[in-house]
């Protein structure tokens, strides 16, 4: 392929390309074939200028027009090729990943955040190469003198916080890709890696006949924040950090999902090639000539002290980088010396990673977005540079409400201190460096549906109701989720399809879905459509607690739903209960009782429930508490029981007046231990002198109280 515009003087799509084209139907097949070849050549050239040289020659709109033209030609004249740029938009979903063997081991490298360990690495390198020091240095000394027999040069590069992949080219064409896996074998992710625009499907320049390279797939920080913003605004949870997002994306079974996400890749090693190199630096400088993107922070240094300085510079600059790094990789530059040093079973002796310190508690607000919950409540969320807080990586934090934003004076660009409420929920505690004017302005219209925002004290709500796509989607997602009715076959993407196709505009619409309508949608088939229909039919008589949890009543999760079901027995009884009756239920306090009463007092919610009943959905009533034979006793259950679950055992004793709790204390009367019990509960029982019953003894106790196990 041509790598310079001067090498393709007859290609009209490289310099100032036209973006208005004749109709495809007016072309002959030969003319279409010739234009398609020129477009592929031009698109590869522009990809190289954009991704590898970071010096694009045409605007994005012009590139998109060329890409669309090539797609139209390939479709109209059946001109698709394996290495066409249009093959980077996804493909058919996979059933599973195959395992492939790497062409060469993909070893990890030893690492430490202690500078003394870095100097120890340097000493080992010189000792093994027979390069002695002029003055003896004690182990751990952080300053080295010159070496009598010569010094070792080091090639330094950032240690990217992404996902390592092996990419193989044969005759310059993309052949396959695999994750690192265990270092010897990895998952075959050929279809997914193909979609990454910065990874060429055909090499350029004077490439070798065979090439296997190692790269790091990552999501640029700006793209990560933008993608998280989209997820939050549509009601989805954001990704925790760029590395998790990249790893999860690369392991998607549907390549079209991978193609939609902003993955990128840096290459940094040659695993095997039909060409020899003499130094790390030579290898790194050659990769871009073949169209493979490398990092511009890589550099050659004279000694280990300069390598340490390199890492310290990374610490200073990492907030300004558009990718996450967690260390500096220090490699012996001379490849002949690397061969002499060799490797252990897990790591090369010629490389070491000097880790960066974790970011702790203080970080920068990169964006503030407003999330629309399924109840319509608008919650401001700060998207952050990932930071370590009490051992957990945090990339978002709650700002709670407009009043708190104003009190903090927080805005995009500010440096803030992050805390975790109860060591769980991250929140912005204070602004430690004000880099903005004023504070974030809370919107007066819903960011999703543009409906007016209504304030109830410090809380803000979208007035769009189920006409708001975020509320509708979140409500339906919750209804079919594992925390709701657990309806298989309706993941996020499939649900999006149904909403966009106009097949689902409310929860009851799920029960109007027809197999023929579903089978016509992309990615669906007769089998998957029939499976979903069967799932929906099977869930028309859900348990009362599952149904209550699925409705998405604020503050009512599975545990509270179970308590309500046991206390009231039927849906109508729960719907008609007043706040005093609700507060008499375990797990229900004044706030939860008010939320439940508000939910079932809403005319719109009652209409949805009535509509569900008209579609044949009727939750099963449950037997309410039947007696007080076990009144005053408290049980804790651990391990697996034979014939029934722990939850069913808990429900049984509670129906007969006992309490069932999750942890052993001095108030516990019995610990019931099934197979593989938790060690901590057994230890607590011993220290609190709580009797431990196996399943046989538990059932004997029930029999003594005339209670039968169902």
Image (cartoon, rainbow, N blue to C red):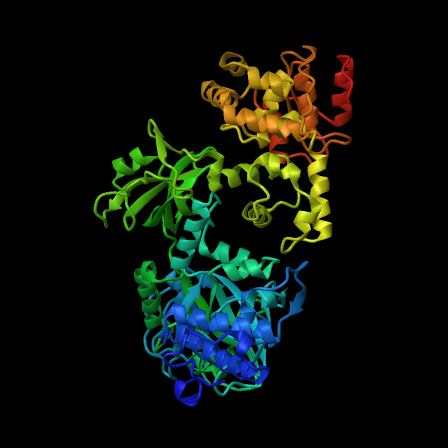
537 lies above or below 665: below
Number of numbered discs visible in the structure rendering:
0
Nearest the eye: 501 or 163: 501
Residue 269: x and y in percent read: 49, 75
Let me know if residue 657 appears in the view: yes
Q: Is residue 527 left or right of residue 596?
A: right
Question: Residue, x 67% and y 26% (percent of image)?
Answer: 618
Residue 466: x and y in percent read: 49, 35
Q: Is residue 314 left or right of residue 243?
A: left
Nearest the eye: 327 or 415: 415
Residue found at the far left of this picture? 437
Question: Residue, x 44% and y 64% (percent of image)?
Answer: 160
Residue 210: x and y in percent read: 58, 83
Residue found at the far front of this picture? 26
22 lies above or below 237: below
**Quarter that holds the C terminus:** top right
């Amino acid at each position: 392929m041509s790598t310079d515009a001067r090498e393709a003087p007859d290609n009209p799509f490289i310099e100032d390309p036209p973006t208005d084209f004749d109709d495809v139907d007016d072309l002959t097949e030969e003319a279409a074939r010739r234009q398609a070849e020129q477009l592929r050549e031009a698109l590869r050239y522009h990809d190289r200028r954009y991704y590898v040289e970071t010096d694009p020659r045409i605007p994005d709109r012009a590139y998109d027009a060329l890409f669309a033209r090539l797609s139209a030609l390939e479709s109209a004249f059946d001109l698709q090729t394996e290495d066409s740029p249009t093959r980077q938009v996804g493909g058919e979903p996979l059933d599973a990943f195959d395992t492939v063997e790497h062409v060469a081991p993909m070893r990890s490298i030893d690492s430490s955040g202690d500078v003394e360990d870095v100097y120890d690495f340097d000493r080992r390198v010189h000792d093994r190469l027979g390069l002695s020091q002029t003055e003896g240095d004690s182990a751990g000394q952080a300053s080295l003198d010159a070496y009598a027999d010569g010094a070792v040069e080091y090639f330094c590069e950032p240690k990217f916080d992404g996902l390592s992949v092996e990419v193989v080219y044969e005759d310059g064409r993309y052949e396959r890709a695999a994750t690192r896996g265990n270092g010897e074998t990895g998952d075959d992710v050929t279809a997914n890696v193909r979609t990454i625009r910065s990874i060429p499907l055909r090499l350029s320049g004077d490439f070798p006949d065979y090439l296997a390279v190692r790269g790091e797939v990552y999501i640029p920080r700006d793209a990560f924040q933008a993608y998280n913003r989209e997820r939050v605004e549509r009601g989805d949870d954001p990704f925790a950090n760029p590395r998790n997002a990249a790893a999860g994306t690369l392991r998607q079974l549907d390549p079209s999902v991978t193609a939609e996400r902003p993955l990128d890749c840096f290459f940094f090693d040659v695993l095997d090639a039909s060409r020899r190199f003499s130094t790390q630096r030579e290898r790194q400088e050659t990769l871009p000539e073949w169209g493979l993107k490398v990092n511009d922070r890589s550099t050659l240094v004279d000694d280990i002290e300069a390598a340490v300085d390199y890492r310290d510079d990374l610490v200073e600059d990492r907030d300004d980088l558009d990718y996450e790094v967690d260390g500096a990789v220090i490699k012996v530059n001379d490849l002949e010396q690397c061969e002499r040093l060799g490797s252990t079973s897990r790591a090369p002796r010629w490389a070491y990673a000097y880790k960066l310190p974790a970011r702790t508690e203080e970080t920068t607000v990169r964006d503030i977005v407003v999330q629309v919950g399924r109840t319509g409540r608008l919650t401001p969320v700060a998207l952050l540079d990932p930071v370590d807080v009490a051992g957990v990586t945090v990339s978002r934090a709650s700002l709670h409400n407009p009043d708190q934003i104003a009190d903090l004076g927080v805005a995009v660009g500010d440096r803030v201190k992050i805390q975790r409420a109860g060591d769980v929920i991250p929140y912005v505690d204070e602004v430690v460096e004000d880099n903005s004017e004023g504070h974030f302005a809370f919107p007066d219209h819903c960011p999703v549906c543009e409906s007016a925002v209504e304030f109830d004290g410090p809380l803000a709500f979208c007035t769009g109701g189920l006409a708001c796509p975020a509320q509708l989607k979140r409500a339906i997602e919750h209804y079919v989720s594992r925390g709701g009715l657990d309806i298989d076959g309706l993941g996020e993407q499939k649900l999006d399809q149904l909403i966009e196709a106009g097949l689902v505009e409310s929860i009851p619409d799920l029960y109007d879905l027809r197999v023929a309508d579903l089978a016509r949608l992309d990615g669906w088939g007769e089998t998957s459509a029939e499976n979903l229909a069967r799932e929906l039919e099977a869930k028309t008589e859900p348990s009362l607690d599952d149904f209550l949890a699925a409705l998405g009543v604020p503050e009512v999760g599975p545990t509270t739903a179970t308590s309500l079901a046991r206390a009231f027995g039927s849906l109508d009884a729960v719907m008609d209960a007043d706040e005093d009756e609700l507060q008499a239920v375990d797990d229900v306090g004044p706030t939860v009782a008010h939320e439940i009463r508000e939910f079932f007092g809403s005319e719109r919610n009652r209409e949805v429930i009535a509509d569900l009943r008209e579609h044949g959905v009727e939750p099963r009533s449950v037997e309410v508490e039947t007696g007080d034979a076990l009144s005053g006793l408290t049980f804790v259950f651990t391990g697996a029981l034979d014939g029934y679950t722990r939850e069913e055992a808990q429900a049984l004793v509670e129906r007969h007046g006992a309490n069932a709790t999750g942890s052993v204390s001095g108030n516990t009367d019995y610990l019931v231990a099934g197979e593989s019990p938790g060690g901590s509960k057994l230890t607590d029982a011993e220290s609190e002198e709580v009797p431990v019953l196996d399943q046989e003894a538990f059932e004997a106790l029930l029999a003594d109280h005339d209670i039968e196990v169902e």
